[in-house]
DNA sequence: GCTTATTGCGCAATCA
DNA sequence: CTGATTGCGCAATAAG
């Protein structure tokens, strides 16, 4: 599918002198047609070619517009277009890829986040248990310098019930 | 491949009907803050040189044209185009917005991640301190029932309450 | 001042 | 049938 230089038949009427633009009016307030506001829009209020030149000349429609000589039939031109098209394709491909990568990153980060939160939860729990144990001990020591022989402190804070039920 | 309909000329026309007007329309107003206007792109609505409303054969030399319909000069056509252009613009805008949002999400998640990791670090530290204290204590108890009498170097866990963060 | 990369846009085919 | 998407090419810039 390379691009064999082709004579390009239909090129003749491209625009050369005529911007065949077809029909008149392109919706004057085009935006008015639809909720332009909704669509975003940054419309530039009519920018007229206010060129300082005297009678601008090109303001006359029925005349010929002197467009730069961009010979569309030129071989050079065709070649450049071709290259640009390629570049465009490449660029867009990259862009898309990047978007996908970003999306993926979001997923990864989300997963990571969950993992981290789980870990935090775990650590917090461990910590609270240990703290409780410590407090208990401290209380025991404070209350009585000679706590019961029972080393383990499975008892409510402060004084544990020596004569506990069972 | 994509367009088996025609011998793909290197032109903009998608099917041979020819996009005669090239993209010269003057964006009536719509987006674009681009300085393109500077180029003096003042395209004025104007009638095309000639087009019979009828099927005036297009300009396609030695080929066969199988898509005569689609009167570009039709009012209907123009209207549909305009609408589609709007839709396209809207769609693209959304697409872009979405991409940006996703990117932002990545940033937020990254931040969150850092925060969480910091928290984990803190908790881990606290935990290790407590554990050490605990172990020490346990050893003392196991080795000797009378820790206070022992060498003063290893003073009991004093009191220091690490529960003070954030 | 060239070339490539990006960007906005319109057209048309296709999807929904 | 209508709006939404998508591939593609053009042209104007931006970037190198």
Image: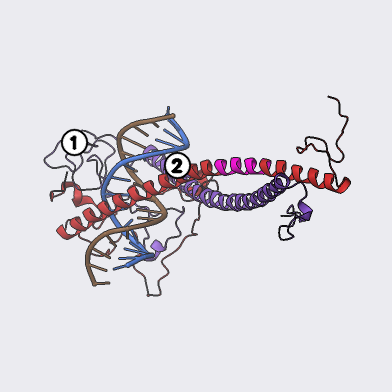
Chain colours: A red, B purple, C brown, D blue
Report how many numbered discs are placed on residues in the image.
Answer: 2
Q: Residue at x 27, y 43 (%)?
A: B51
**Is label 1 in contact with label 2 (beta carbons under 8 Å)?**
no
Name the mark on residue B87.
Answer: 2
Tell me residue B25's x, y (percent): 36, 52
Quadrant in which the C terminus of chain A is drawn: top right
Disc 1: which chain?
B
Q: Residue at x 73, y 47 (%)?
A: B144
Disc 2: which chain?
B
Residue B35 belongs to magenta span: no
Element carrying mark 1: loop
Q: Are marks 1 and 2 on the same chain?
A: yes
Q: Is residue A24 visible?
A: no
Q: Residue at x 78, y 55 (%)?
A: B149
Is B90 left or right of B136, judged from the image as shown? left
Residue A120 belongs to magenta span: yes
Q: What residue did someone put label 1 on?
A: B65
Q: Is residue A10 visible?
A: yes
Name the mark on residue B130.
Answer: none
Q: Which residues are magenta?
A: A114-125
Q: Is residue A143 above or below residue B155?
A: above
Which quadrant of the view contains residue B159?
Answer: bottom right
Tell me residue B71's x, y (percent): 31, 38
Tell me residue B161's x, y (percent): 76, 54
């Amino acid at each position: 599918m390379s691009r064999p230089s082709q004579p390009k038949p239909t090129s003749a009427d491209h625009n050369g002198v005529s911007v065949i633009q077809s029909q008149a009016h392109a919706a004057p307030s085009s935006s008015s047609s639809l909720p332009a506001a909704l669509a975003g829009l940054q419309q530039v209020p009519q920018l007229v070619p206010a060129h300082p030149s005297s009678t601008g000349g090109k303001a006359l429609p029925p005349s010929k517009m002197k467009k730069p000589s961009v010979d569309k039939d030129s071989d050079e031109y065709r070649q450049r277009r071709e290259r640009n098209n390629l570049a465009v394709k490449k660029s867009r491909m990259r862009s898309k890829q990047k978007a996908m990568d970003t999306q993926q990153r979001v997923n990864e980060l989300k997963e990571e986040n969950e993992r981290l939160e789980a870990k935090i939860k775990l650590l917090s729990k461990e910590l609270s248990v240990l703290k409780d144990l410590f407090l208990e001990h401290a209380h025991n020591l404070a209350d009585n310098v000679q706590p019961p022989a029972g080393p383990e402190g499975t008892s409510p804070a402060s004084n544990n019930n020596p004569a506990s039920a069972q």
